[in-house]
Image (cartoon, helix red, strand yellow):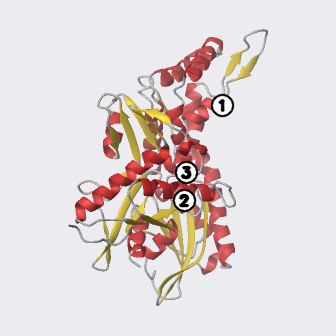
């Protein structure tokens, strides 16, 4: 019989997740696959095999063109009415609480199989805010996440703000008394924690968060660069009488939003799009929209946008968003200036979030000795460029970007 284990620290992320526990005084992350400490937070409900696939298997099934329903970014649904609505998936009617619980149960089973321990307690990361400071959905979002853990088989769950966990993982920074700013930009939220190193560990001075993350970056790029190719911004002839009106934005906004994509393939949307094709001033573009809905290609578009974003951020000489799934040879360039234009308002919001964290702590930007970046989306150059402009005297470091939160949760879980 397995001996009782310490609590499992779990970083349940919008795009990727990780878990770990303290072993011989050091955080030990659970391998989610050979050589991988993170697991994509994705689901694929395979219509042929009637199985629910998770993580890389879900991603492969989507990219291989299997028949089924793909879901990503469900963390952003926490706190909303969608969490508790039953919907037909494969042979059963389930809520998103049950869907997320299956993912957390997979992590729990993986951790127990890898360690031979039994994990009944979890310390879960959570964003500083799920929706926004003062938003009425905040308490509901944490309650929803707690229900997911309980449904996954955990008996107890506590929560810790994700940037605080990253601050713990960063240790004592360089020396006692130094002040660090954790900039945690994930898939769905961006969180900030000011911390001061001391003999007893890391003291959190203030934490703040904004509902902006990598999925929002993707959404802005998609709306600005891809959706015009599908008819966004074009004109429709009026069904009766002269004149035109613009195409409605709602369908394009939903197609560009990761967590809303599974719900766009409705008969109503398909009928509306067929009507728009008939009345379109530019029917070729609206025909592409019809093809995306008919062939259920919206997730393919979203992944294409994400790949284009990564290529543009990585200094590709000719970055493009390639949309061959919709039409052979179809693509749109994404040069650095276009990327900066798409993401400019998000950079401004991040700067305001960092400034608010300083205000809460009563600390000046010049007093910040070090800026530590965590979260996959912090690797976007616009994030570090803006933070360097705000904190020019600080040292900027990228340490364990993808696993710092899980490391900190593993350490804190043992306390």
279 shown above or below 63: above
* Element class at badge 1: loop
Q: Nearer the viewer, mark 3 or mark 1?
A: 3
Label located before the other in sequence (3 or 1)? 3
User: Residue sitting at 54 percent across and 23 percent down?
Assistant: 289
Residue to which mark 2 is pinned: 383
Q: Quadrant of the C terminus?
A: bottom left
Q: Say the numbered circle drawn on residue 379.
A: none
Q: Mark 1: few, some, or many residues within 10 Å (few <14, many ≥20)?
A: few
User: Residue 353 falls in which quadrant of the image?
Assistant: bottom right
238 shown above or below 334: above
Residue to which mark 3 is pinned: 78
Q: Say the numbered circle drawn on residue 249.
A: 1
Q: Mark 2: few, some, or many residues within 10 Å (few <14, many ≥20)?
A: many
Q: Nearer the viewer, mark 2 or mark 3?
A: 3
Q: CA distance from mark 1 to mark 2?
A: 28 Å
Q: CA distance from mark 2 to mark 3?
A: 26 Å
User: Residue sitting at 44 percent across and 49 percent down?
Assistant: 100
Instruction: Please state if 91 lies on the left or on the right of 211 as rendered.
Output: left
Instruction: Please state if 224 lies on the left or on the right of 330 as rendered.
Output: right
């Amino acid at each position: 019989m397995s001996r009782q284990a310490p609590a499992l620290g779990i970083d349940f992320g919008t795009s990727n997740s990780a878990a770990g526990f303290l072993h011989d005084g050091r955080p030990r992350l659970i391998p989610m696959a050979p050589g991988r400490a993170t697991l994509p937070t994705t689901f694929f409900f395979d219509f042929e095999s009637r199985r629910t696939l998770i993580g890389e298997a879900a991603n492969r099934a989507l990219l291989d063109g299997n028949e089924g329903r793909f879901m990503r970014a469900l963390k952003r649904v926490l706190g909303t009415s969608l969490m508790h609505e039953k919907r037909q998936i494969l042979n059963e009617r389930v809520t998103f609480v049950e869907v997320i619980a299956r993912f957390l149960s997979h992590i729990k089973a993986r951790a127990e199989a890898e360690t031979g321990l039994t994990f009944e307690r979890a310390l879960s990361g959570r964003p500083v805010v799920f929706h926004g400071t003062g938003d009425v959905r905040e308490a509901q979002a944490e309650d929803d996440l707690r229900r997911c853990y309980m449904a996954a088989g955990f008996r107890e769950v506590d929560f810790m703000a994700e940037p605080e966990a990253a601050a713990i993982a960063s240790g004592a920074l360089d020396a006692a008394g130094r002040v660090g700013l954790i900039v945690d930009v994930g898939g769905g939220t961006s969180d900030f924690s000011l911390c001061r190193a001391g003999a007893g560990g890391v003291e959190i001075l203030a934490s703040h968060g904004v509902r902006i993350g990598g999925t929002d970056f993707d959404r802005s790029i998609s709306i600005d660069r891809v959706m015009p190719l599908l008819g966004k911004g074009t004109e429709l002839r009026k069904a009766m009488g002269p004149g035109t009106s613009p195409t409605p934005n709602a369908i394009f906004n939903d197609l560009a939003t990761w967590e809303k994509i599974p719900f766009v393939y409705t008969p109503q949307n398909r009928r509306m799009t067929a009507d728009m094709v008939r009345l379109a001033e530019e029917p070729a573009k609206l025909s592409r929209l019809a093809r995306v809905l008919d062939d259920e290609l919206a997730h393919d578009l979203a992944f294409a946008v994400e790949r284009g974003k990564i290529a543009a951020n990585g200094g590709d000489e000719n970055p493009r968003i390639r949309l061959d799934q919709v039409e052979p040879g179809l693509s749109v360039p994404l040069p650095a200036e276009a990327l900066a234009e798409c993401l400019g308002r998000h950079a401004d919001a991040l700067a305001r979030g960092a400034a608010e964290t300083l205000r809460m702590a009563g600390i000046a930007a010049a007093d910040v000795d070090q800026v530590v970046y965590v979260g996959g989306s912090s690797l976007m150059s616009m994030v570090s460029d803006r933070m360097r402009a705000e904190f020019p005297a600080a040292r900027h470091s990228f340490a364990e970007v993808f696993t710092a939160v899980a490391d900190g949760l593993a350490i804190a879980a043992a306390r």
